Image (spheres, rainbow, N blue to C red):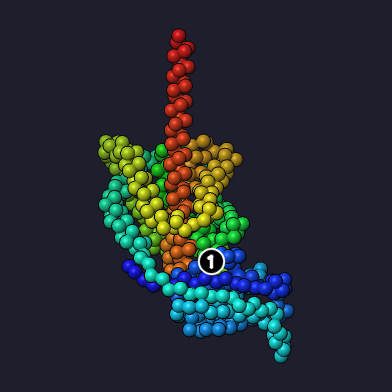
Amino acid sequence: MVRALFIVVLLPFVTLGEAQKSFLSFLNIENNKILFFTKSEETIIIRSSYKDRQPSSSYLSVQLEDPKVLQVVNVTKTFLDDTNFIINVVTDEEGETNLTIQLWDSEGRQVKLIEEIKNIKVKVLKQRRESHFPASMQTDRYILMLILPMILLNKCAFGCKIELQVFHTVWKRPLPVFLGVVTQFFLMPFCGFLLTQILALPEAQAFGFVMTCTCPGGGGGYLFALLLEGDVTLAILMTCTSTLWALIMMPTNSYIYSRLLGLSSTFHIPVYKIMSTLLFILIPISVGIVIKQRLPEKANLLEGIIRPLSFILMSVGIYLTFRMGLMFLKTVNLEVFLLGVLIPMLGLFWGYSFAKISMLPFPICKTVAIESGMLNSFLALAIIQLSFSQSKAELASVGPFIVAMCSGCEMLLIFLIYKARKKYVLVTEDKRKKLALV
């Protein structure tokens, strides 16, 4: 589908004298960095360190040289640690214009000019390009429809591996589940927010990473718990529990961190998607539990196909994630990519560390780590797509896709290292036994 895209390049040119006295600084623009707007309606955020003597006494005015190129819809003000002004603009025609931004303060009947920045160059370019994203999404839907029966069969097979005794044990001692919830919904979002501020990411992109960090455990968690010899039953229970908690914690974290990042928007939490995800896990797994109780021979057959079927689904999942995220990989810089690599590693580290400090058994430590590091990033993607305009949604969607791609590759690498190390230990033990016999 071909559509017109508007690329707006804002390059502020400020003289040395103005720079020395200026209180205003544009967010997301560093030196010659280009800020892209891919839709006709966009927002510009301006931060001022000027403190009002009276609440709401300061205000911002914007002057345009050519209103045919750019129009200001409104200017609103928010209050955080600094004062943020949000300018909503609309691009109309291709061309260039200049902006003048003034910060005013009204003291009684007197109006005082606090600061002024002139000659902000704005260049609007109309460009046409193919949008490959919808076409790839359509192809991916067909692939998902083909493998859907395999996914349901695999979840049913996992249900056959569940030990009901483990449920009773976790019910009496829910510490592993508690550690997973604390890591996923409290520690990880804060770490994500802190890292995005250190790297000075744009607000929308930072929000995408923070929301990815506040996602519950994904379906890949109990797959890798099986492959890495963790506790599969505990992994499934932790996934279901964290998905339930997501109904409360994802709206809470989205509200808190959007305000901290200076984003003003109405965030829509995909309650239906969260509940459908939970049911998509529970129903086939429950069928597997019933099969194990009623038809143990069929259950043994299903357990035998878990590993090969899981490898197939894991390979298809990584392929689809890379296919959808390839368009983002071409545009991200090194800092964003490193952040995508670091976030799953942080989840693994914090989950394992907390479980180890709590002196839990080694298989449970591995399970808590896996559930904390393998996140259902596509729930964050749903929030972003529902809450932002298309241009901001594309920028914010970088986080979920990059984290999903990196977490899958990292867990696959960990599994390969684990298998290689295990094989090395077995070979070494065999050699020692043979030498002992000789």
Residue drawn at point x = 32 percent, y = 56 percent? 140
Q: Position of residue 57 (x, y in %)?
A: 68, 82
- Identify the residue at horizontal 72%, vertical 71% (top origin): 20
Residue situated in front as seen by the camera: 40 or 100: 100
Position of 416 with respect to 179 (left or right) is left
* Residue at (46% x, 61% y) in the render: 397
Viewer-nearest residue: 234 or 321: 321
Describe residue 172's horizontal placement relative to residue 103 as left or right: left
Name the foreground residue: 149 vs 410.
Answer: 410
Q: Can you give x and y, in whole percent of width and height, for residue 277 in the image?
A: 38, 56
The three-letter code of the residue at mark 1 reads: Ile
Picture residue at 41% right of the left edge, 55% below the top: 326
Residue 214 visible, this angle: no
306 shown above or below 7: above
Q: Quadrant of residue 84?
A: bottom right
Q: Please state if 32 lies on the left or on the right of 157 as rendered.
A: right
Above/below status of 149 relative to 7: above
Crowding at dot 1, Cα within 10 Å, few <14 / some 14-19 / many 20+, comes out as some
Please name the residue that numbered disc 1 is placed on: 34
Q: Would residue 4 be seen by someone viewing this image from the given angle?
A: yes
Q: State the residue in front, 47 or 400.
A: 47
